[in-house]
């Protein structure tokens, strides 16, 4: 696997682990609606990095899509902001930096199989999580239900989701990858509402609608090409 993806794959995995850890920490210290801010700046950062490193061009329509996506998420999180959640929001912003670099890294290695990067990300993330447990003396004992949820998260969202993301990187530009990933913030508040009773507010619904419009604009313009 190391030979297939090379150093870029390992680096992408390390970056991915940073993004995953920041995402989990942000979810603990702020609301789901605020935590999805981690995705908001992804397209902009990926566009800048992709333009510098990969020499990828971004069309005017794509920038309009990005603007709509950022506006939608700004509306979503603006109504839920609280000074008490500042730490979680800052960690979310750090996570978006990791995710932006991850999108560009796997796009940079598109000539090779970058799916092993997901495995490297899982391993490095597990190592860092173990070190945090040792440092904080929290231990590894968790309730059975939480263990099942962790397995579900690791297999479905992190595992399958990131494998598909890496495969898509072979043909989709880095900024397009992160823009598609912005679909998660639309559904995240809904899952939180159904799962733990964290009901989305009116601004969350309005912002989600604006974000979907941005995604649809990008998808339709890509098909037109």
Image (cartoon, rainbow, N blue to C red):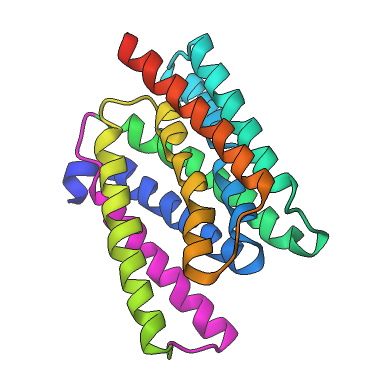
**Which residue corresponds to the image point at 66% horizontal and 52% vertical from the top-left?**
201
Would you say 160 lies left or right of 92 here? Answer: left
Q: Is residue 59 above or below residue 199?
A: above
Question: For residue 147, what is the image quadrant?
Answer: bottom left
**Which residue corresponds to the image point at 24% horizontal and 46% vertical from the top-left?**
115
On whether residue 132 falls in the magenta region, the answer is: yes
Residue range highlighted in magenta: 111-140
Task: Tell which of 173 and 194 is nearer to you.
Answer: 194
Whether residue 88 is visible here, answered yes or no, is: yes
Q: Quadrant of the C terminus?
A: top left
Q: Extreme right residue here?
A: 83
Residue 21 placed where, x, y %? 50, 62
Task: Tell which of 72 and 109 is nearer to you.
Answer: 72
Would you say 3 lies left or right of 209 here? Answer: left
Would you say 162 lies left or right of 20 here? Answer: left
Residue 181 placed where, x, y %? 43, 40
Q: Is residue 100 above or below residue 131?
A: above
Task: Tell which of 47 and 6 is nearer to you.
Answer: 47
**Which residue corresponds to the image point at 48% horizontal and 15% vertical from the top-left?**
58
**Which residue corresponds to the image point at 46% horizontal and 46% vertical from the top-left?**
184
């Amino acid at each position: 696997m190391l030979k297939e993806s090379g150093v870029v794959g390992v680096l992408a995995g390390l970056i991915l682990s940073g993004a995953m850890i920041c995402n989990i920490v942000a979810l603990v210290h702020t609301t789901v609606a605020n935590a999805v801010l981690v995705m908001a700046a992804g397209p902009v950062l990926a566009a800048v990095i992709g333009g510098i490193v990969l020499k990828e061009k971004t069309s005017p329509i794509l920038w309009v899509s990005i603007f709509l996506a950022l506006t939608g998420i700004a509306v979503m999180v603006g109504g839920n902001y609280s000074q008490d959640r500042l730490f979680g929001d800052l960690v979310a912003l750090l996570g978006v930096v990791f995710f932006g670099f991850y999108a560009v890294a796997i796009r940079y290695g598109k000539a090779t199989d970058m799916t092993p990067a997901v495995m490297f990300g899982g391993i490095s993330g597990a190592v860092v999580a173990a070190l945090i447990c040792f440092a904080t003396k929290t231990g590894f004992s968790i309730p059975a239900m939480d263990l099942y949820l962790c397995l579900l998260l690791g297999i479905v969202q992190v595992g399958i989701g990131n494998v598909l993301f890496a495969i898509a990187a072979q043909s989709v530009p880095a900024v397009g990858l992160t823009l598609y990933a912005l679909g998660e913030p639309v559904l995240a508040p809904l899952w939180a509402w159904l799962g733990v009773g964290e009901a989305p507010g009116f601004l969350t619904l309005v912002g989600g609608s604006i974000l979907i419009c941005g995604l649809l604009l990008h998808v339709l313009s890509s098909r037109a090409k």
